[in-house]
Image: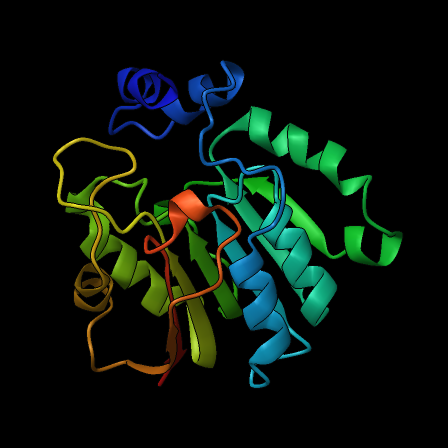
Amino acid sequence: MSLDRLHEIITDEPSTWEEAWKEEVTPWDRKKPQIALKNVLESFTEFPKVGKALVPGCGKGYDAFLIAEKLGLEVTGLEVSATAAEQSKVLAENYPENVRAKVAVTLEDFFQYSPSDPFDLVYDYTFFVAIPPTRRPEWGTQMQKLVKPGGFLITLMFPLVEAHDTGPPFWIEYEHYTKALGRESWKKVLDEIPEVEDESHRGKYRLAVWQKL
């Protein structure tokens, strides 16, 4: 039912995500960080321990706080929903000050976002699948700008299911990411099927880490 209502609410206009948050039609919100992200942050030793990270479409910020906690990076979360951004402030109270102080959720359109400097790490989970497929080339172009040379992009791909025409979440395959990113500017440094907590999600996740050349 929540997906049906989501499809009724969401259009190509980013501001419609605010309505979904207001109505609490947020089936992607697992109310905790992703275990796949936690595991890769703890096991992949090449991630930077100083610098800046970006989480587009961060929601309440579970994964943004996890990145700050595990890597010590200054994390910017991007949101188009003021309700989600406000709820991130409530979530922040669950973390110690040294973590809380490293995370800032800001109201920005990913495609219009133009920071003064690129990031050491960018993390995409349920953002790529939320944008209209026609905008995926723009996503790739923006990632080129947002990740500094030598920096990393983590793509946690979900849900990997049979092809379908409706969304969000829109149909994705691994090749959709590689096509959007292009092969000239990125080196894939990790590709795995991550651990899942929900058995119904088994086989629907894939995690890849890309390094900007």
Residue 113 placement (x, y as % from top left): 43, 50
Left of 160 or right of it: where is 71? right
Q: Residue furthest front?
A: 199
Task: Say left or right for 33 vs 150.
Answer: right
Q: Nearer the viewer, residue 49 or 14?
A: 49
Q: Is residue 32 above or below residue 186?
A: above
Q: Describe residue 61's horizontal placement relative to residue 165 as left or right.
A: right
Please state, as top left, top right, bottom left or bottom right, where the N terminus lies in the image: top left
| 145, 174: nearer the viewer | 174
Asked which colour scheme the image uses, the reply is: rainbow
- Residue 12 falls in which quadrant of the image? top left
As drawn, the residue found furthest toward the right would be 97
Q: Does residue 126 show up?
A: no
Identify the residue shown where x is 32% and y is 50%: 128
Estimate the x, y position of residue 10 in percent, counting from the top left.
31, 23
- Where does the C terminus fall, quadrant-wise? bottom left
Please tell me which residue lies in front, 46 or 140.
Answer: 46
**Is 10 above or below relative to 155?**
above
The x, y position of residue 143, in whole percent, is 35, 63
196 w.r.t. 117: above or below: above
Tell which of 160 and 49 is nearer to you. 160
Picture residue at 69% right of the left edge, 52% below the top: 103
Left or right of 27 in this view: 71: right
Question: Which residue is found at the position 79% from the left and 56% from the top?
Answer: 99
Give the x, y percent position of residue 55.
51, 54
Residue 3 location, quadrant: top left
